[in-house]
Amino acid sequence: MKRPLVLSLAFAAAALLLGWFLLPQAPLRWLPAVDVQLSIAPDPEGSLDQTHRSGLQALVQDLLEGQRGAAVTRTETTHDLRHRTEVPIYHLELNPRRRGNDLVMDFRWRKGSGPWQEVRREPAPPREALERFRRGLPFWVRPNSRDLLLPGDPADAWTLIELNGRTVGDPARPDFQQLAGALAQRHPDCATAWWTLGRAALVDLIIRANRMPESRETAFRALERCLDLFPTHAAAQAYLAQGYTDLGEPSRGLTVLAQALRKQPRVTLLLRQVAYSARCAGLLDLARRAIDRRRETVPIPLGIENALLYTGAWNDFEAQLLAEVEAQGWQAPSQRFYWGYVTLLRGDRALAARRFPPPSGQGWSPFRFSRLSRLFLDLCEDRQDSARLLLVDLLKDHQALRAPDGEYTIKLAEAATLLGERELALDLAGLAATHGFGCVAWYERSPLLAPLRSAPRYQDLLRNLRQRQADLERRFPPEAFGL
C-alpha cells in the first residue's frame, strides 16, 4: 500500500517541479488578468531629473506589459480611473532615486481602494535594482533574462534610461540615434537598446523631410531584433505595426497586431494601435471594437481617435478630444486642428475658423499641424491666394518624406478640393491610397471630397480600394484579434 502512495507523491512532486520550471514560459494569456495604474511620486531630493524619471516609468511599463500582459495606464493620480471591470486593479506608485550610479527603486502599492503597502529597496546597479523591484511586486511577473531590459554596465544603463525618457528629435539630444545605435552594438542582447534604436530610426523615417533619415532596413531590423529577444515587448510590436501601416503595407501591420493580441489581449497600447492600423485599412468595425475594449479597461480620454470620424461619430470624436483637453490642457497643434476640422465637416466655416489655432511655427516637424491649421483657416476665411501658396509649400515638404502619412495626404486632397484644384485633388486622393490610407468609408463619406466623387478617376480609385478592403476584411476579422 505504501509503494503506490510513494509513487503518487513522487509523480506529484515531479509535476510541480516541472510546472515551476515551465511557468516563466507560460503564455501570458493564461495568467489571471491584472490592471495597473502606474504613477510616480515627487522627488523632493531632486536626485533624478524628469527625463530619467519618465524613462524609468516607461521601463516599468515595458516590464509589466511584456512580462505579465498587464493593462497599464500611466497616470498622474493614484485614484481609480475605471468605470467598471471585474479585473483587479493595482495602484503602483514609483519612488526612484539615484545614488551615484546606483538606483533606489522604492515603491508603494495597493489593490483597489485597500491600504497602501510600502516596499523599500537598497541601492543597486540599475539592472539589479529593476530585478529586485520585480521580485517585490504584489503579483507574479516573469523573471527577466540577463540583459533583457537593461545592460549590466551602470553608465550605459543610465544612458538608456535617459533616452527612453526623451522624445525622438529632442534638441537636447541631437545624437539620440547615434547613442542608441552604439548601445545596441555594445549590448546586443539588450532588448531595450534595440527598441530605442528602432523607435528613433522609424520616427526619423516617417517624419523627417529635411535630411536623409536612417534607412528603412535599420528601423525594422532593430525592432525585429528587439522582438527576437523580447517577443512580447508591446511598444516594439506597436511601432513595428505602425511602420508597416504608414509605409502602405497594412496587412503586415495587422498580422503583427493579431499575433500580439493573442498573447496580450488587454494591453492598451496594442489596442490603440489596432484602432489606428484598422482605420487606415478601412476596417472600421475592427477599429471600433478595439476602441470599445480599450475604454472598458481605461476610461480616461482617448484623445484624437480618427476611427470615430470615419464612422461618422463626430459628436463622440469631439467629446473625446475635449475631454482630453480638459484633463491635460492643449498639448499639441493637432488637437486644435481637429477641433476646427470636425466643425468644418459639419459645414460651419465661421465657427471652424474660430477653433483652428492661430498660425505659429515653421518647418515640418513638429509644426505640420500648425501649418495645416493655417491652410484650413485661410480656406474658411476665403483667403484663396494665401491658401494656395501654403498648400504648395506643404506638398513640397510632404512629398520629400520617405514614408508619407496617408491620413495627412487625404487632408491635403480635401484642401485642394476646397480650393477648386480638382485635378490636383484627384492626384492627392490617389496618393493617399498609395501612402497607406485605404479607408473606403471616408473616401465615400467626407463632405470635403464630395465634388470629386463623380469623376471617373475617383470612381476607379473607389473600386480598387473596395477590392483591397474586402480582401483585408476576409483576412482580418475582429475574431482574429480576440475582439
Image (cartoon, rainbow, N blue to C red):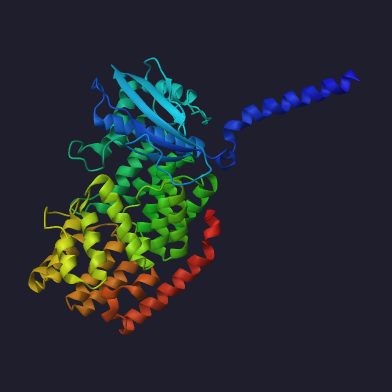
Is 156 on the left or on the right of 273, as rendered?
left
Whether residue 179 is visible? yes
Whether residue 376 is visible? no
**Residue 264, how many percent across, how many down?**
51, 44
**Residue 170, how many percent across, how many down?**
21, 40
Q: Quadrant of residue 418?
A: bottom left
Considering every residue shown, the one lying at the far top of the view is: 122
Instruction: Identify the residue at image location x=26%, y=37%.
Output: 166
Look at the picture and state if 105 lies above or below 363: above
**Residue 404, how many percent across, how many down?**
28, 60
- Quadrant location, the N terminus: top right
The total number of labels drawn is: 0
Name the foreground residue: 383 vs 79: 79
Name the foreground residue: 459 vs 382: 382
Look at the picture and state if 177 lies above or below 472: above
Name the foreground residue: 278 vs 241: 278
Instruction: Identify the residue at image location x=30%, y=33%.
Output: 54
Instruction: Identify the residue at image location x=39%, y=55%.
Output: 244
**Residue 117, how many percent across, how many down?**
44, 23
Instruction: Identify the residue at image location x=43%, y=44%.
Output: 82
Is 162 on the left or on the right of 4, as rendered?
left
Look at the picture and state if 115 lies above or below 255: above
Look at the picture and state if 480 lies above or below 442: above
Considering every residue shown, the one lying at the far right of the view is: 1
